[in-house]
């Protein structure tokens, strides 16, 4: 009974890619340049073990700008997925917005299109989902889907700290600390109670 919880049983965590899971390279097009950010493996593995479905949403305006194509962005995603899989971390879905800032699409974060697509395709409920990223465009996605945001100070995170604090959004050093926010004392108390066959009231 002590194995990892089933994926999605605890909820959904939408995670940004660049500057959050991997080191920000600005328009990364080469899978060989993929490097995991500090805390990424520790944080994501704890969230997965706790039963959160991990879904990666990434804005890739480099495609709209003609710097690289969709297939290239997907190869970078595949490299990240391989590194996570080597650590035993399963990602439920990878979603890319290929558009630019002025394109008016419904999928460039903070627009909710990618999250809604994931909900549809994976058959999951996303209300109350967590959203973790290094920009306010990630954090504002949480508002758009009725979720909860966490800003990490890896990547471009330093530039988001003031706005995040003003919006009372938790600011943490990296994905490992983000997992601390999500798997806090209340969640732990429920997990311990559950393992003894007790039931605590929700919330
Ligand atoms: Mg980012
Ligand atoms: Zn888009």
Image: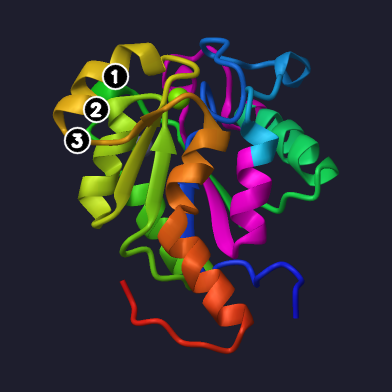
Q: Is residue 158 left or right of residue 163?
A: right
Residue topped by disc 2:
164
Q: Quadrant of residue 167?
A: top left
> Tell me, what colour scheme is on the image?
rainbow
Give whichever of 57, 133 is nearer the camera.
133
Label 3 SS = loop
Q: Position of residue 44 (x, y in %)?
A: 62, 44
Mark 2 and mark 1 in contact (Cβ < 8 Å)?
yes
In space, the residues marked 1 and 2 are separated at their CA atoms by: 5 Å
Q: Quadrant of the N terminus?
A: bottom right
In space, the residues marked 2 and 3 are separated at their CA atoms by: 6 Å
Q: Position of residue 107 (x, y in %)?
A: 34, 42
Q: Is residue 56 above or below residue 2?
A: above
Q: Quadrant of residue 132?
A: top left
Q: Residue at x 85, y 42 (%)?
A: 86
What range of the chain is rendered magenta?
43-72
Give the mark nearest the N terminus, 1 or 3.
Answer: 1
Residue topped by disc 1:
161
Q: Quadrant of the C terminus?
A: bottom left
Check disc 3: other Cα within 10 Å, few if <14, some if 14-19, many if 20+: few
Q: Is residue 148 above or below residue 150?
A: below
Residue lying at the far left in this picture: please name it.
166
Q: Residue at x 29, y 54 (%)?
A: 147
Label 1 SS = helix
Residue topped by disc 3:
168
Asked whether 192 falls inside the magenta stretch, the response is: no
Q: Position of residue 15 (x, y in %)?
A: 49, 41
Give whichever of 64, 156 is nearer the camera.
156
Residue lying at the far right in this picture: please name it.
86
Mark 1 residue's CB less than 8 Å from ligand 1? no
């Amino acid at each position: 009974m002590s194995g990892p919880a089933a994926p999605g049983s605890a909820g959904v965590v939408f995670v940004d890619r660049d500057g959050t899971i991997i080191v920000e390279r600005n328009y990364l097009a080469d899978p060989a340049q993929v490097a995991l950010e500090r805390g990424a493996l520790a944080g994501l593995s704890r969230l997965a073990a706790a039963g959160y479905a991990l879904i990666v949403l990434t804005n890739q305006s480099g495609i709209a700008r003609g710097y690289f194509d969709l297939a290239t962005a997907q190869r970078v995603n595949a490299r990240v997925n391989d590194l996570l899989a080597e650590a035993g971390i399963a990602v439920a879905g990878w979603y890319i917005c290929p558009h630019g800032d002025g394109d008016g699409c419904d999928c460039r974060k903070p627009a909710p299109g990618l999250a809604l697509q994931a909900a549809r395709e994976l058959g999951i409920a996303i209300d109350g989902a967590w959203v973790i990223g290094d920009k306010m465009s990630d954090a504002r996605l949480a508002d758009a889907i009725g979720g909860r945001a966490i800003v990490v100070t890896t990547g471009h995170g330093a530039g988001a700290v003031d706005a995040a604090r003003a919006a009372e959004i938790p600011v943490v050093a990296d994905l490992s600390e983000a997992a601390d926010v999500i798997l806090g004392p209340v969640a732990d108390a429920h997990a311990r109670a559950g393992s003894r066959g007790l039931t605590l009231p929700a919330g």
